[in-house]
Amino acid sequence: DTEVTQTPKHLVMGMTNKKSLKCEQHMGHRAMYWYKQKAKKPPELMFVYSYEKLSINESVPSRFSPECPNSSLLNLHLHALQPEDSALYLCASSPFEGASTEAFFGQGTRLTVV
Amino acid sequence: LAKTTQPISMDSYEGQEVNITCSHNNIATNDYITWYQQFPSQGPRFIIQGYKTKVTNEVASLFIPADRKSSTLSLPRVSLSDTAVYYCLVGEGNSGYALNFGKGTSLLVTP
């Protein structure tokens, strides 16, 4: 199984809502990543978890709150988002943190903030 | 973190070989060179990775000169389904920052 599964595939939320994005992998990978991608732009790295500990936070606003409950699961909690936060949110995993191995990406969650 | 420079876009006809060059003048000793492919509204997909010289797999070849300041992704005999954005990533083997994406090259393959 070389899949990274993201749910939901689509999400529409109001600016006062609280929602969560979920990412799951069963490849035994110990690094997991969240990215944000706007239309016709490259993916922007948001957070990196390594062995369930937050390794990198790319100065992401606090309305995005990551959580890694176990080695297979990564969540992104959303609260009080703005319309400009609408984007494709991608999750990825790799055997360990870094560039020397292949990273596997999920299909993403298309988020629309209204 | 090594900065990468790629052409913004390239066009090719079906059946041709396509070479996309990435410049990374300040590559460090511990840095790997990795290429990803992305189709619209999908997550990127790993294509190939190298450290030096030449690497080949069933999809592509990666050429890296001795000074490692550039690399070339070679796609043999492209088809319409190779139309995608191709990203060159350069980074350290054990740093998550290495998975920062640059601007990428948008490849359009036409009949």
Image (cartoon, helix red, strand yellow):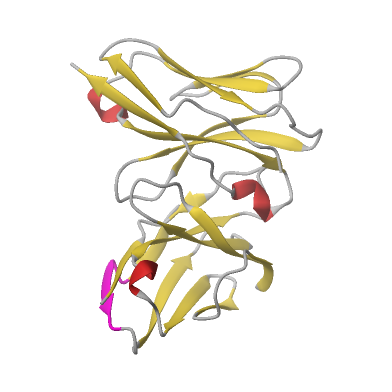
The residue located at (49%, 81%) in the rendering is A63
Residue B33 image position (x, y, % from top left): 64, 32
Q: Is residue A57 magenta?
A: no
Write the residue at 43% across / 29% down.
Answer: B8
- Quadrant that contains the C terminus of chain A: bottom left
Compared across the picture, whether A92 is left or right of B70 comes to left
Identity of the residue drawn at 62% across and 61% down? A31
Q: Is residue A47 left or right of residue B16?
A: right
Q: Residue furthest right?
A: B29
Where A13 sits versus A59, above or below? below
Picture coordinates of residue B103, whole percent (x, y): 48, 39
Quarter of the view holding residue A38: bottom left
Q: Looking at the rendering, in which quadrant would you find the N terminus of chain A?
A: bottom left
Q: Residue furthest top?
A: B16
Which quadrant of the view contains residue B64?
A: top right
Residue B5 location (% of width, % of height)? 57, 30
Is A103 situated above or below B79? below
Would residue B20 be found to the left or right of residue B50 on screen?
A: left
Q: Nearer the viewer, residue A15 or B88?
A: A15
Residue B25: x %, y % from top left? 71, 26
Nearest the viewer among B28 and A7 is B28
How many tags in the picture? 0
Chain part drawn in magenta:
A8-14
Measuring 62% from the left and 68% from the top, which residue is drawn there? A59
